[in-house]
Image (cartoon, rainbow, N blue to C red):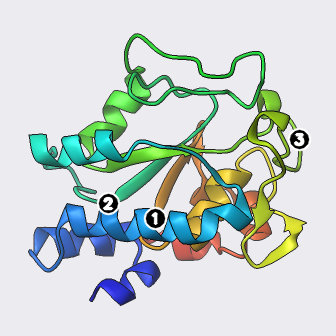
């Protein structure tokens, strides 16, 4: 079953967890392996917090609709105490938050397993994700010579290519629900509406 997880949407993954066919730890392991394999070429995931994610699982995940689904947050605008941020800027690099924002608290209540942050252009401005703080542009997973778009290029590239990572919060929208970002990385918003 693990080999088929990359094709499943968030609802399907949560259903597998609820049915006992896969564990949140197995999903996290698959997501981390996919990021490790693909991120060096893509530059889509800027922060991994494996220990935080494993602790969340060990402490018991909320019984929300996406319990156990691996999740990434955009490196822009989401305050999360266990996930330092660059906000796409050298000036704001390694910002540490005192607590979680209300939106992140609500996200956690859905039962997702947050394990990192995705790249964003400085200030969230631009049609490409090319912030210098990340050491280079975020690449399109289908053609490394093309952009993954912006301002949610990292989220879009990660969702399109990193196994069972089926959700990535990118400011007020998710990458899957943003037609322009989904189009850059070859994901259909119709495909993602199921999740």
Return the x and y of residue 159 as percentages of the image width and height: 56, 64
Disc with the residue nearer the chain's start (3 vs 2): 2
Which secondary structure, mark 3? loop
Which residue is drawn at the image coordinates 81% and 47% (left, top)? 129
Residue 88 visible in rendering: yes
Return the x and y of residue 158 as percentages of the image width and height: 59, 61
> Does residue 186 appear left or right of residue 27 in this picture?
right
Above or below — where is 133 with respect to 3? above
- Report the Cα–Cα distance between label 3 and label 2: 29 Å
Return the x and y of residue 81 as percentages of the image width and height: 40, 21
- The residue that label 1 is drawn on is 166
Above or below — where is 23 with respect to 55? below
Give the crowd class for mark 3: few <14, some 14-19, many >=20 residues within 10 Å.
Answer: some
Residue 114 or residue 14, whichever sits in front: 114
Which residue is drawn at the image coordinates 67% and 62% (left, top)? 40
- The residue that label 2 is drawn on is 69
Labels 2 and 1 touching (C-beta < 8 A): yes
Above or below — where is 16 with respect to 117? below
Residue 195 visible in rendering: no
Q: Quadrant of the C terminus?
A: bottom left
Which residue is drawn at the image coordinates 24% and 48% (left, top)? 54
Which residue is drawn at the image coordinates 72% and 41% (left, top)? 120
> Does residue 159 appear left or right of residue 40 in this picture?
left
Labels 1 and 3 touching (C-beta < 8 A): no
Q: Residue furthest top?
A: 98
Residue 105 or residue 95, whichever sits in front: 95
Disc with the residue nearer the chain's start (1 vs 3): 3
- The residue that label 3 is drawn on is 126
Residue 45 or residue 182, whichever sits in front: 45
């Amino acid at each position: 079953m693990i080999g088929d997880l990359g094709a499943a949407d968030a609802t399907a993954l949560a259903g597998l967890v609820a049915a006992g066919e896969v564990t949140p730890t197995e999903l996290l392991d698959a997501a981390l392996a996919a990021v490790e394999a693909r991120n060096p070429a893509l530059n889509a995931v800027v922060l991994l917090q494996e220990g935080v994610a494993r602790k969340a699982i060990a402490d018991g995940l909320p019984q929300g609709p996406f319990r156990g689904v691996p999740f990434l947050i955009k490196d822009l605008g989401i305050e999360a105490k266990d996930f330092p941020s660059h906000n796409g800027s050298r000036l704001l690099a390694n910002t540490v938050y005192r607590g979680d924002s209300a939106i992140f608290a609500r996200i956690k209540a859905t039962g997702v397993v947050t394990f990192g942050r995705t790249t964003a252009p400085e200030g969230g401005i631009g049609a490409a994700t090319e912030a210098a703080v990340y050491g280079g542009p975020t690449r399109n997973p289908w053609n490394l010579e093309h952009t993954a778009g912006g301002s949610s290029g990292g989220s879009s590239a990660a969702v399109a290519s990193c196994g069972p990572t089926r959700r990535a919060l990118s400011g007020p929208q998710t990458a899957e629900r943003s037609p322009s970002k989904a189009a850059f990385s070859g994901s259909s918003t119709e495909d993602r509406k199921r999740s």
